[in-house]
Image (tube, rainbow, N blue to C red):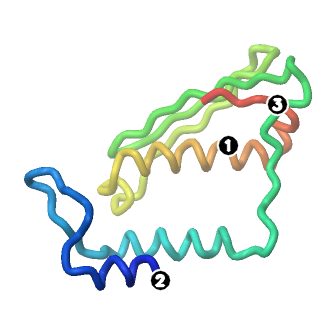
Amino acid sequence: MIIAADLDAREEPEIEFSKGYPISTFITPELIAHCSALEHLLAAEAPLLVPVRPTDAHKLRYVVGDASAEGFFIATQYPDLSITTRGGLWEDEFAEGSSNLREAQNFGNHLLDEIKAGKHDGCAVWA
């Protein structure tokens, strides 16, 4: 906040902007929601520890998925070649948003459900 206040107090910005891009933009409700979420995620004194290396080279999962304006589908393949899938339709209000958001939500929901069920303990997940 101090650095932002210092930059705001300067008469001329040091940054050169490309032609056609505004020097400043409006703060949107979506940005405020994202900042609130980050404050919540980063509120702990100690960082969250998440293991990122697999404990077994043979524990590999492949996950593929896609999301459109209307619906989504995602699948996970396991080493025994079995596959779990989920698919469905978005609520109308969510379907109007960004397709990037829908695809991230699709992968996030699927992987969180499978992680909670213990299906990815100690493995590498390729998405």
Which residue is found at the position 56% from the left and 27% from the top? 64
Residue 111's place in the image compared with 35, above or below, is above
Q: Nearer the viewer, residue 77 or 41?
A: 41
Q: Residue at the far right: name it.
A: 55
Which residue is found at the position 51% from the left and 35% from the top? 73
Mark 3 and mark 2 in contact (Cβ < 8 Å)?
no
Residue 73's place in the image compared with 90, above or below, is above
Q: Which residue is mark 2?
A: 2
Earlier-in-chain disc, 2 versus 3: 2
Q: Residues within 10 Å of mark 3 (few under 14, many from 20)?
A: some
CA gap between label 1 and label 2 equals 39 Å
Residue 84 position in % (x across, y down) = 69, 30
Tell me the amino acid under the disc marked 2.
Ile
Mark 2 and mark 1 in contact (Cβ < 8 Å)?
no
Q: Which residue is mark 1?
A: 111
Residue 67 position in % (x across, y down) = 42, 39
Q: Quadrant of the C terminus?
A: top right
Q: Nearer the viewer, residue 120 or 88?
A: 120
Q: Which residue is mark 3?
A: 123
CA gap between label 3 and label 1 equals 12 Å
Q: Secondary structure at mark 3?
A: loop
Q: Secondary structure at mark 2?
A: helix
Which residue is found at the position 41% from the left and 42% from the top? 71
Q: Residues within 10 Å of mark 1 (few under 14, many from 20)?
A: many
CA gap between label 2 and label 3 equals 43 Å
Earlier-in-chain disc, 1 versus 2: 2
Q: Secondary structure at mark 1?
A: helix
Q: Nearer the viewer, residue 60 or 52?
A: 52
Residue 61's place in the image compared with 48, above or below, is above
Residue 20 position in % (x across, y down) = 8, 54
